Structures are given as structure tokens and as C-alpha cells.
Image (cartoon, rainbow, N blue to C red):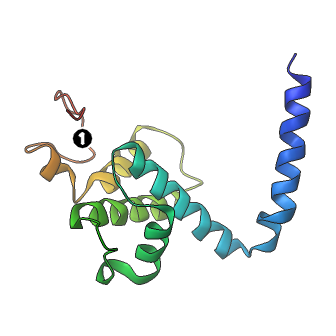
């Protein structure tokens, strides 16, 4: 079952490996994935940053706010960068509640109280966290 799909996936993965991944150092590969992770994770939450905006912010820091982007969006990206760095530095840590809570705390550290007053990043909540 799904043999053709698996073969197709493997061909695409091999091509990607040769044309993209193998041409990067490990450091470049991690930076590339951090930028994609942060850009798309934040986009799910409504952040308007593009992948290029995210790359610029990662490379130049909070001193370079891309035109048309809010400080809140920049802060959300910076929190994602810290969470990504934390996860990468804790790859040997068991995938458990404490890891997830700390990652959530880092992801929401500087934006949670703005979006949901009274909520504490990294803690359980009984509030509806969905946006209107």
C-alpha cells in the first residue's frame, strides 16, 4: 500500500538532498530550518512576516524591523528563534511535559500577556486562546 507514493517521495527527497541540503554546512542548514520554522509557525498564528523578512530579522536582530511589520510581530519571531535554539540544544531531552512547557514558555514569553492578559506563558490555561 502506498508504494508508488513512497517511491515518489523518496525521489523528491533525494533530489532535494542533492540540490539543497548537501550544498549547505550544518550551520547553514540549521539557520535555514530555523527561519522556515519560525516564519511558517508564526504565519499559522496570523503573523505577516515573509520568509525573507524572517531571515533579515534573524540576521540583523530587532534593530532591523522590516517595513510594514509591527513590533509585536518582530517580538513573536524573536521568541520563536529562542524556542528553536532551546529545542536544538535539548535534543537529548525526553519529549515530555517539561520540554513542551518550556518550549511554549519561550515561544510566548514576550507576546502572551499582550494577546491574553493574565495568561502565563508555559502554564496551562482555561481561557479560550483562539483569535476572533
Specify the farthest residue to the front.
68
Q: Position of residue 119 (x, y in %)?
A: 14, 42
Q: Observer-nearest residue: 131 or 68? A: 68
User: Where is the N terminus found, in terms of image quarters?
Assistant: top right
* In the displayed structure image, the side of residue 40 where residue 73 appears, left or right: left
- Mark 1 is surrounded, within 10 Å at the Cα level, by few (under 14), some (14 to 19) or many (20 or more) other residues, namely few
Residue position marked by numbered label 1 in the rendering: 123
Determine the residue positioned at 54% across, 63% down: 34
Determine the residue positioned at 52% across, 55% down: 37
Quadrant of the rendered structure where residue 130 is?
Answer: top left
Tell me the element at label 1: loop
Determine the residue positioned at 40% across, 65% down: 82
Quadrant of the rendered structure where residue 30 is?
Answer: bottom right
* In the displayed structure image, the side of residue 107 where residue 71 appears, left or right: left
Q: Position of residue 74 (x, y in %)?
A: 30, 66
Q: Position of residue 26 (x, y in %)?
A: 71, 72
* In the displayed structure image, the side of residue 45 where residue 89 appears, left or right: right
Q: Position of residue 87 (x, y in %)?
A: 50, 56
Determine the residue positioned at 19% across, 32% down: 132
Total numbered labels placed on residues in the image: 1
Specify the farthest residue to the left.
118
Amino acid at each position: 500500500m502506498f508504494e508508488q507514493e513512497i517511491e515518489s517521495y523518496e525521489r523528491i527527497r533525494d533530489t532535494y538532498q542533492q540540490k539543497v541540503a548537501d550544498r549547505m554546512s550544518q550551520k547553514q542548514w540549521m539557520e535555514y530550518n530555523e527561519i522556515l520554522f519560525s516564519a511558517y509557525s508564526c504565519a499559522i498564528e496570523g503573523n505577516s512576516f515573509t520568509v525573507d523578512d524572517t531571515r533579515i530579522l534573524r540576521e540583523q536582530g530587532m534593530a532591523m524591523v522590516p517595513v510594514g511589520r509591527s513590533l509585536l510581530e518582530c517580538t513573536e519571531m524573536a521568541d520563536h528563534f529562542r524556542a528553536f535554539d532551546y529545542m536544538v540544544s535539548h535534543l537529548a531531552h525526553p519529549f515530555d511535559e517539561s520540554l513542551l512547557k518550556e518550549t511554549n514558555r519561550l515561544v510566548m514569553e514576550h507576546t502572551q500577556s499582550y494577546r491574553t492578559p493574565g495568561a502565563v506563558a508555559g502554564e496551562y490555561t482555561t481561557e479560550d486562546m483562539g483569535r476572533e
